[in-house]
Amino acid sequence: MSGLRAFGRIILALLREIGDENAYARHLAAHRCEHSRAEWQRFSDERMAAKYSRAKCC
């Protein structure tokens, strides 16, 4: 049963990474902020701006 729990934890951690929850947690820690709707919006806007401001080659 512990193998199944470990597998579940790995899957949950993977989903948190894919869903930007881990990145958001790091953002909160780095900026010493608490979770709020406004802070999530700021985080999302910064990530989208960074993502789409980079030029793509070919």
Image (cartoon, rainbow, N blue to C red):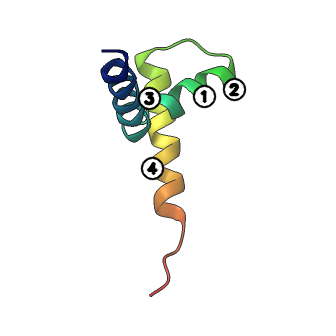
| Gap in angstroms between the C-alphas marked 4 and 2 | 18 Å
Q: Residue 2 appears at what percent x and percent y?
A: 37, 15
> Seen in the image, is 54 located left or right of residue 19?
right
Residue tagged by mark 2?
Answer: 30
Specify which label sits upstream in the sequence, 4 or 3. 3
Residue tagged by mark 1?
Answer: 26
Which residue type carries mark 4?
Met
How crowded is the residue under tag 3: few (<14 C-alpha within 10 Å), some, or many (20+)?
few
| Gap in angstroms between the C-alphas marked 1 and 3 | 9 Å
| Element under disc 2 | helix
Query: What residue sits 65% from the left and 21% below the top?
Result: 29
Q: How many marks?
A: 4
Q: Are marks 4 and 1 in contact (CB under 8 Å)?
A: no
Foreground tag (3 vs 2) = 3
**Residue 46 shows which numbered tag?**
none
Specify which label sits upstream in the sequence, 4 or 1. 1
**Residue 21 shows which numbered tag?**
3
Q: Are marks 3 and 2 in contact (CB under 8 Å)?
A: no
Q: Residue 31 appears at what percent x and percent y?
A: 68, 24
From this view, report whether residue 58 is shown above or below residue 23. Answer: below
Foreground tag (4 vs 2) = 2
Query: What residue sits 50% from the left and 52% below the top?
Result: 49
Query: What residue sits 54% from the left and 24% below the top?
Result: 25
| Element under disc 4 | helix
Instruction: Look at the image and tell me in which quarter the N terminus lies.
Output: top left
**Of residues 3 and 52, the one drawn nearer to the viewer in this rendering:** 3
| Element under disc 1 | helix
